[in-house]
Amino acid sequence: MALNWKWDEKCGEAIIRQQGKDWTISLYQGNAFLIFLYEYTDEAGEKMYQMYNFWLDKQHMKNCLGLNKKEGYGDNMFGSPDCKLVSVRINKEKYRYTKDLILALIQAFDDLTIELYSEEVGE
């Protein structure tokens, strides 16, 4: 099954630092736990996007964050000097897994900015 999401249902943003540069990544839920997209405008002025990453479900998120050591997933792929999650901003009104996400991020990171906000669906 392919990943899909609705463009008008963005649920937040993340800042990811790669090789010394910060990238703003849009967060969507769609048919996955969380979908990470890099959205930008190209030289011709067209809106573009690139799939950055996704977490299929809660277990996949834990694996990617290095929180499943018993199963062999002890490395946080978002916690290395080459790829570091710096901040997460989540609209708790649009994202149904906010509590699970925040708890996992608290376990996985010692230095991370987390911002929750509420913007009603349809605003």
Image (spheres, rainbow, N blue to C red):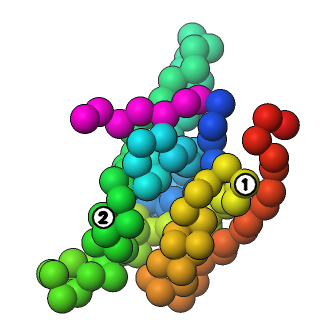
Q: Quadrant of the N terminus?
A: top left
Question: Residue sitting at 60 percent across and 66 percent down?
Answer: 98
Question: Residue sitting at 21 percent across and 78 percent down?
Answer: 73
Residue 57 appears anywhere in the view: yes
Residue 86 appears anywhere in the view: no
The kind of residue on which mark 2 rests is His
Which of the pair 25/91 is nearer the observer?
91
Secondary structure mostly seen in the magenta stretch: loop
Q: Are the two marked residues, 2 and 1, in contact with CB atoms closer than 8 angstroms? A: no
Q: Quadrant of the C terminus?
A: top right
Q: CA distance from mark 2 to mark 1?
A: 23 Å
10 Å neighbourhood of mark 2: few (<14), some, or many (≥20)? some
Helix, strand or loop at disc 2? Answer: helix
Quadrant housing residue 63: bottom left
Q: Is residue 122 left or right of residue 22?
A: right
Segment colored magenta: 1-7
Q: Which mark is residue 19?
A: none
